[in-house]
Amino acid sequence: MEIRFLADAPLYRDSNLTIVFAAEVDGERVPCAISVEALEDHFGASVAGRDAWMNAFNAGRPHIEAVARTHLQVSHGTPVLLKSGHFPPGRAVG
């Protein structure tokens, strides 16, 4: 299974409080997302708000994509929604 993350700018979705980013799995685009709660709990978004969540996502993107990669492998390339429980307790190293 070939997985790569696209350089597209992430998008904030206020309808479900997530940051959406894209992966490509075996040539097919697969949506991935992380909850703002996970960004607050593990990536230093200390102030609630779009700018803080986007900054936390961008700073932690390598780690977030690594966790998303694992879930894409386990799920055989189905869409991924990362929540706070997908990360160990405490702040993640970016």
Image (cartoon, grey):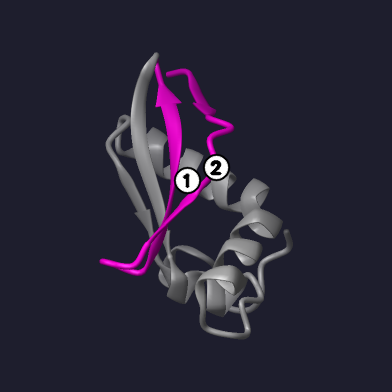
Amino acid, disc 2: Ala
Q: Name the residue under label 2.
A: 9
Horizontal relation, residue 33 to residue 16: left or right = right
Which of the 4 image quarters holds residue 52?
Answer: bottom right
Q: What residue type is labelled 1?
A: Ala
| SS label for mark 2 | loop
In the rendered structure, the answer to whether residue 86 lies left or right of residue 30 reads right
Name the spot of residue 70 as percent of width and height, x first. 47, 42
Q: What stretch is highlighted in magenta?
A: 1-26
**Total count of labels:** 2
* Quadrant containing the C terminus in the rendered view: bottom right
* Nearest to the observer: residue 71 or residue 61: 61
User: Are there few (<14), some (14-19), or many (20+) residues within 10 Å of tag 1?
Assistant: many
Mark number for residue 68?
1
Q: In which quarter of the image is the N terminus?
A: top left
Q: 3 and 44: which one is in front?
A: 44
Compared to residue 38, the image places residue 61 above or below, namely: above
Residue pictured at 45% horizontal, 32% vertical: 23
Q: Residue at x 66, y 67 (%)?
A: 92
Which residue is pictured at 34% across the width and 47% down the height? 80
Q: Nearer the viewer, mark 2 or mark 1?
A: 2
**Image mark for residue 24:** none
For the residue labelled by badge 1, is the local secondary structure a helix, a strand or a loop?
Answer: helix
Q: Distance between the residues labelled 2 and 1?
A: 16 Å
Dot 2 alpha-carbon crowd within 10 angstroms: few under 14, some 14 to 19, many 20 or more: few
